[in-house]
Image: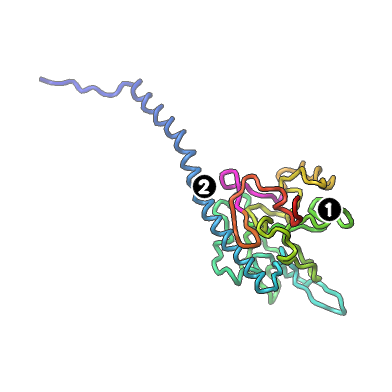
Amino acid sequence: MNRQRRGFTLIELLVVIAIIAILAAILFPVFAQAREKARQASCLSNMKQLSLGIYMYAQDFDEALPYNYAYEGAISGGNCTQRTPPVLRWWQDFVRPYIKNEQVYICPSGSIGRVLYTLGRTAPGAQLDPNPLVKDYIANAAAAAADRGIVAGTTFTGRVGPFTNNGGCGTEIVTLAQLEDVSGTIAIFDGYRSSEIWALCQSNCPNITPPQPTACAGSRLNTPWPNYAAARHNAGYNAGYPDGHVKFAKNPRCGEFTRNPGD
């Protein structure tokens, strides 16, 4: 007896396709989060090695932390002048002798907005490697500007992180002893950087006491800032501390961005 073969009806096919689509809509975000979780762990490992490199540097230099950036200068007649063309080293260059793997300077999730820095890396006789410099990780530093943490002669003086900058004339070097809370002050973190330095106004801490300068309010209107903490790992970012430990942060304490106690 011949049996008639029966295929799928259009309705059955549409139902199967709809089920597959629903499953894909449910599972794809889960897979994406799992992949990002793996990149987050890899980034945290990078941050750990970099934080330990910073700590080892400090131990070799009487507990002095490296500059965030420093222009190489020459002393002439008691005055300090920058080299021309300029030679500009960043904290990555200072800790490089303690870290032999260049990959640890690169965040696996940092491709969007990645900054490749070339200024001051090609002076004759002082070529710096690598060139360009990858800036996926930002040092917590500030400069003397109303929207960047230091306002000379006001109560805002000193509301900065553990790094400082050297314009080529021997600026202050910060030591571990100057940090009231070494394990609670962010040193480096996931970030984007297209201008020179990190600004306290960008720490997502609008309610600091005493309040930040008026310049901060205006600066916050410019979004996104050229420098900011990059929440690229499942809405959070990794941070490293001067004592060498690291952690993942979604809502870090405002005071973690300054070396002042209790703010």
Query: Residue placed farthest to the left in the image?
Result: 1
Read off the residue under disc 2. 36
Q: Is residue 218 above or below residue 96?
A: above
| Camera-side residue of 233 and 65 | 65
Residue 127: percent from left, percent from top: 66, 72
Pair 2/1: label in front: 1
Q: Mark 2 packing: few (<14 Cα in 10 Å), some, or many (20+)?
A: some
Please state, as top left, top right, bottom left or bottom right, where the N terminus lies in the image. Answer: top left
| Camera-side residue of 155 and 125 | 155
Gap between marks 2 and 1 measured at Cα: 38 Å
- Asked if residue 22 lies left or right of residue 201, the reply is left
Q: What element carries label 1?
A: loop
Name the amino acid, label 1.
Answer: Phe
- Asked if residue 77 lies left or right of residue 55, the reply is right
The reply to whether the magenta stretch includes residue 52 is no
Name the amino acid, label 2.
Answer: Glu
Disc with the residue nearer the chain's start (2 vs 1): 2
Residue 86: percent from left, percent from top: 75, 69
Residue segment shown in magenta: 226-238
- Res. 156 mark: 1
Residue 39: percent from left, percent from top: 52, 51
Q: Is the magenta stretch mostly helix, strand or loop?
A: loop
| Camera-side residue of 92 and 174 | 174
Q: What element carries label 2?
A: helix
Residue 218 image-quadrant placement: top right
